[in-house]
Amino acid sequence: MQNLRKFFRVAVFLCCTIFLLSPASTVVHAAGEDGDVEGLWLRIPEFPDDAEVVEFNADEDGEVNYTRSIDGGRFVLSILRSTNEDNMTPEKMKEAIAESAKDSGVDPDDINFDSGAESFAEKLSFPCVTAEYEIGEKDEAKQIAIIGVFTEDYFFLVHVAVAADSFDDYTDRTREWFKGMELVGGPETEEEGRGDLFDDETGEKADKKIDFVAVVYSLPDFRGVPWKISSPGNYDLARGFDIPNDSISSVAVCPGYRVTLYEHSRFGGESAEIEENTEDLGERKGWASSLKVEKTEEPDLDLALEWVAVQSENEGTFEEIDLDTAAAAKGLKIHAKRMKLFQGAGEMHWYGKTKDGERVMLGKELIKIFSDLGVDMDNWEENSFAQAMNNFYDWRKDLSVWDKACMILNLDPKAFKQ
């Protein structure tokens, strides 16, 4: 934490100093390029090659501070890499960001946290934190943007400061620069690089590329909401990924890889190792809150491609239901009014002022409706269905209660529109 606070002080000092000095008077403390850093590094290859290196420091413990600027310091980019011996977490980083901002006269309540964390986490395959706020006044005002990335051995912090009166001039360019941000080098990225694990540039499969090495599903038999995991890494579902927390029910693993599920967030509690496709986790359905994906051996390309083809067939396939039966027609008529209410209700109606017991009763009612429509609900109880609704709304809030229930059951909500 002390190193992080020091970095914030240095970053703010550099940003303010560069902004006030002309390019001719800026001192370059040490020459260096992104690729000069040994081990795992966070690289932004699209950032201008002629950007001035303002500071480059690396110590024997693996800590690196790297600062570059463009346009006379109107845009300053700093990157810190520090070993994660102190178990830096997203929560601790947010505390450090809030404290640093407070020292600069910023109300911590004015910091916009995590607006882009999910997209960066998906891109880098590691948990991320983002923060945005403004410091200074009038001509000295600056927009600050921060990205924190948490790998197993390191944490990275990207600090961007932009002159507030030039912010609009950099918006599109910044978006393009950060599209290419990637982790390179070091054991956590594998020698082949992230996302290109099975490229065979000389063989007949040169045009083939494996985009994921594991898939977790929200329902047994590799059904429901799928999350394709692109590369090895540590994933805490509480940080936001493409599947709700406590919802994994089946796991597909590419040959040569292993998935370890953990009962709690931050890889705590009991664990379960999975090295082959598991269509039903049994007692561990809806149990995992974090997971790790590891490479155990060099995969066979043919087997890997075949595995990917099979998993790709599962995507976007809804459960088959027959609404033309007499029983389903009767169910549609009996429940028409309640179905319409559920179709028009949103997340605020599910949570809103309702209590746990009331949500359980709603779960019971939804089970009854779907059962009368011919949907197999034998594996659901009112408590488990209500909890699934909670988990899915914690993950994604933009669907109606009916559409959310259909997502949980892997049903096409359009089939029920009347």
Image (spheres, rainbow, N blue to C red):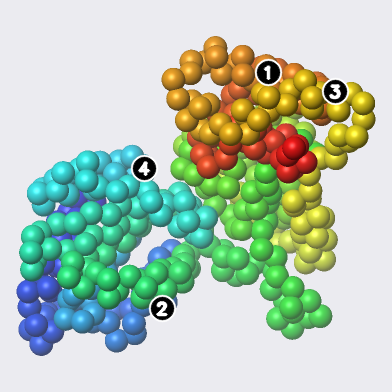
Q: Quadrant of residue 198?
A: bottom right
Q: Label 2 to label 4, Cα distance in Å?
A: 28 Å
Q: Amino acid at mark 3?
A: Lys
Q: Nearer the viewer, mark 2 or mark 4?
A: 2
Q: Mark 3 packing: few (<14 Cα in 10 Å), some, or many (20+)?
A: some
Q: Residue at x 85, y 23 (%)?
A: 330
**Residue tagged by mark 4?**
89
Q: Label 2 to label 1, Cα distance in Å?
A: 53 Å
Q: Mark 4 packing: few (<14 Cα in 10 Å), some, or many (20+)?
A: some
Disc on the earlier residue, 1 or 4:
4
Front residue of this view, candidates 222 and 321:
321
**Residue tagged by mark 3?**
330
**Residue tagged by mark 2?**
46
Q: Amino acid at mark 2?
A: Glu
SS at badge 4: loop
Q: Amino acid at mark 1?
A: Glu
Disc on the earlier residue, 3 or 1:
3
